[in-house]
Structures are given as structure tokens and as C-alpha cells.
Amino acid sequence: MNQKKEYHEKKTHEILEKIRAIILNENFKMTYRSNKEDFIRSCIITFPILILLILNFMRRSLQVELNNFGKFMYLPSISKQTFSAARKKLLPTAFIELNKTLIREFYSDNEFKTFLGYRLIVVDGSTLQLPEGDSIKEKYGKCSNQKEGMSMARISHAYDPLNGITLDATMRPYKSSERTMAFDHILEIPPSNDAGDLYLFDRGYPSITLIFFLLVTIHIPLQENIKKGIE
């Protein structure tokens, strides 16, 4: 009989060390810069510094945040124009890769919370009003049948509520199907080696197609464990 492996609970610094190594990796920089000429000269805002700046979740005015960050990092003064120019050199997909690393590290060789032995994943969707602009409306659509409707997108989110981890999130055109976006979440989320996945959806999601898709994709033998939980 196979026994579940025993793991210690990973410390935050252990996971952050993995992410730090990726940010400092030269191949990571070359993959996620906009052009091959970017980040090759000596400058105040290097590739790792730019990543840290954006990850800092700036909440106050941009210049105040830049000043505080510069003091903390012992950097010369950084202007808003310098930051904006540097940000254009970075591909946003870099943060998707960093988030995948965080998720992979959290769920591998780590002790995390489960429900009846399953990783709990809640999926839900909503809409998001976007800034007005012809290019935005062309890509995402609008929510009104009138000629001048609001720019709107459809968003979807897969979340582990027991561990407070966002596993996947996406933004699509307004007319996209939430159910199709849920399929994409399931395909995108890597399975855990030490726990099955139990997905929770609201009543608008269930269908024979979705249930069959879950069964063949993540192979959940639910009946016995759910029965135990009810008892």
C-alpha cells in the first residue's frame, strides 16, 4: 500500500529564493525582453530592478513609489519617464512565468492544506469594464447593443481558497464563454503530485461535457471520499 510522503511546510524564503534565481537568470532576461537590444547597456533600471519595481505593487503616486524604492535599494533618482521607457522593454508574460514558478514550488515537496485529501479549486467568472479606446473595443468588445457601449472584457479566476493561491486567471473578449474559460483553467493548472484536484463551480457551469472533461483530464475518483465527507 502506497503511503503519502511526509513533507515539511516550505518557508516563504525557500520559494522566493527560487523566484530570485529565475529573475537573475540571463536566459530569462533574453526570453522576456521586447527586443534583443534591450537591457544590454548599463543603466539605473536593470532587468531585475524593473521586475522588482513592478512586483512591489505600487499604490501611491508613481513618483513617490519610485523615490521610496530608490532609497530602499540605494539607487539614484528614478523619474517616471525613465520607468515608463524601461517598462516598454519588458514582456508582460514574464510575470506569468514567475507565477507558474511560485505555484509549482508551493505545491511540490510541500505540506499544504487539502479537503478530504484533495486540493480545492474554486472557479468563477465575471466582467471587467475597460478604459475606452477603439483598439480596446476592437479586441474585447462592448457590453451594449448600442453604437456607443462601454468597453468590457470577460474574466475568469481559478483559486485555491484553503491556501490563498491564485492558480490561473485570464481575460478574454466580452462574448467569450465562461465554461470554455473554465476548460482552459483545467488544462493550464498543473496537477499536484500529492493530492487530487476538487473543482467547485456555481450552477451556471455544470454540463455533461464539463463533467466528462474533468474525469478524463484529472482522473478524480470522487465518490468514495465525498461519501466519507458527508457521513
Image: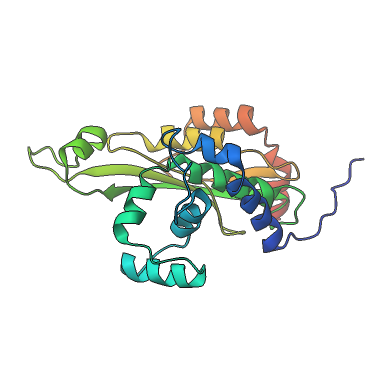
Q: Position of residue 39 (x, y in %)?
A: 46, 43
- Residue at 76% across, 45% down: 194
In depth, the one of 8 and 95 nearer the eye is 95
Quadrant in the picture for the C terminus: bottom right
Residue at image coords 69%, 42%:
192
Residue 30 in sight in this render: yes
Q: Relative to 77, is 185 on the left or the right? A: right
Q: Position of residue 115 (x, y in %)?
A: 67, 54
Q: Residue furthest right?
A: 1
Residue 67, picture quadrant? bottom left
The picture places residue 35, in percent across and down from the top left corner, at 42, 34
Left or right, 179 with respect to 194, comes to left
Of residues 180 and 65, the one nearer the viewer is 65
Q: Nearer the viewer, residue 163 or 58?
A: 58
81, 3: nearer the viewer:
81
Residue 202 seen: no
Q: Position of residue 23 (x, y in %)?
A: 58, 48
Residue at 71% over, 58% down: 14
Image quadrant containing the N terminus: top right
- Left or right: residue 126 versus residue 95 is left
How many numbered circles are shown?
A: 0
